Image (cartoon, grey):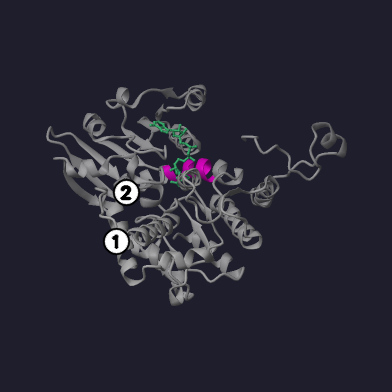
Amino acid sequence: MTIETAILIETLKDLGADVRWASCNIFSTQDEAAAAIAKTKTPVFAWKGETLEEYWDCTLQALTFKDNLGPNLIVDDGGDATLLIHKGYELEKYYYKNKKLPKITTKIEEEIVIEKLLRTVHKKNPNHWHSITPNIIGVSEETTTGVARLEKMVEDATLLFPAFNVNDAATKSKFDNLYGCRESLADGIKRSTEIMLAGKTVVVCGYGDVGKGSAQSMKSYGCKVIVTEIDPICALQAAMEGFEVRRLEDVLNRGNIFVTTTGNKDIITLKHMKKMKDQAIVCNIGHFDNEIQIDALNKSNAKRDKIKPQLDRYTFKNGKQIFILAEGRLVNLGCATGHASFVMSTSFSNQVLAQVFLAQNKPAAGIYDLPRKLDEEVARIHLKHLDADLTKLTKQQAKYIGVSINGPFKKDEYRY
Ligand code: NAI
């Protein structure tokens, strides 16, 4: 719930939607934006610094319309709304079959919170999720991690409704993930630590779209950037951009700042943190906090001092200290206000087109992509703002390269 999502809410309302909203992260709400939307009588369940219980309860509230009805359309970022519905549905299915609810076996704090919440819903109405899912036309998913979750559901044949992959529109992931993070990573680090970046050694874990933007950003400030990667293609890209490519365990004593950008888990472990240089700064810009083992750090014998909200200092037994930003949650949203509006406009243009596509076409369950022509249209409408003049193909040129004069200009496989 940021100022940019406030504009997205207003746009969806202008298109005729009845909107309810929650944040996709406990630290990412801009309270002033939430308050402004609440003033227009659109229900908003979000504030900066929610507990996990509050966060999941807010998600449930956003999904519960009057008379216990569910939504027809969902805008998701990271897939938590989609996950809650699917987990609730699964729990009900288990109950129908076994006439009892399964024991909570997970040891992960957030999963326990979700399981408990779903049991409370079940107690009130054992058919809640089964009754709302038939009315769900679909979801449009914003980010890489959310799309990965959807793909897993398709693989497991559990996806209950159609999903629109907004992330992989070129005008989303090649702009928001890259240029957005190129500016908002530094914003998050600087607002929280006020550190001078020039001359520091920064280790960027992952060199996908977010990693590329993050590494470029730190380089532009005069940092020495080291990249870690598991994918040889991305590692080669990083090397050919002039970045040093190393394994994390080999550079723990060199980095002043560590940034995870992988969408994967356990990238920086407790063992890694113990071996870091004194006063190292550790943060994550990937969607979930499990990229850094914060739970293990909190359970370790390191002493935690809260310097200010979203900035913690941990002192290990040997006196060495490290700083953790936003408790390992996305640093650009936790410690700053996320990407700038212009790049969010390209992302949310895709979200709006996805919502209109779902509402108009009501496709079958599955994952859908934005047609390349609409992707090009999103770029086209943003060019004017940057005072850019687009060259027009001649008929002969179009014929020569085998495209239509008005696009699409590239094949679907083109990578940009
Ligand atoms: P991506 O898939 O393009 O890049 C991730 C990279 O990490 C890949 O190249 C992969 O090979 C690498 N990787 C995976 N495991 C690794 C490991 N153990 N060590 C080193 N590298 C590893 O994904 P993208 O689009 O860059 O997104 C990354 C994360 O950032 C996702 O969680 C996404 O949802 C999130 N995101 C966050 C944004 C923000 O504003 N904070 C904006 C956009 C995306």
Residue 161 appears in view: yes
Residue 54 appears in view: no
Position of 217 compared to 203: left or right?
right
Kindly tell me whether mark 2's CB lies below 8 Å from ligand 1.
no
Query: For the residue marked with disc 2, what is the amino acid?
Result: Ala
Q: Is residue 26 magenta?
A: no
- Mark 1 surroundings within 10 Å by alpha-carbon count, few (fewer than 14), some (14 through 19), many (20 or more): few
Position of 369 compared to 106: left or right?
right
> Which quarter of the rendering shows the C terminus?
top right
Picture coordinates of residue 331 (x, y %)?
A: 37, 46
Front residue of 182 and 68 = 68
The numbered disc on residue 326 is 2
**Residue situated furthest left in the rendering:** 317
In terms of secondary structure, where does tag 1 sit? loop
**Dominant secondary-structure state across the stretch colored magenta:** helix
Measuring 60% from the left and 43% from the top, which residue is drawn there? 170
The residue at which mark 1 appears reads as 100
Query: For the residue marked with disc 1, what is the amino acid?
Result: Lys
Front residue of 287 and 164 = 164
- Asked if the residues shown at circle 1 and circle 2 are in contact, with their CB atoms under 8 angstroms apart, the answer is no
- Mark 2 surroundings within 10 Å by alpha-carbon count, few (fewer than 14), some (14 through 19), many (20 or more): many
Relative to 22, is 260 above or below? above
Picture coordinates of residue 35 (x, y %)?
A: 42, 69
In terms of secondary structure, where does tag 2 sit? helix
Picture coordinates of residue 56 (x, y %)?
A: 35, 60
Q: Quadrant of residue 117?
A: bottom left
Q: Quadrant of ligand 1?
A: top left
Q: In which quarter of the image is residue 282?
A: top left
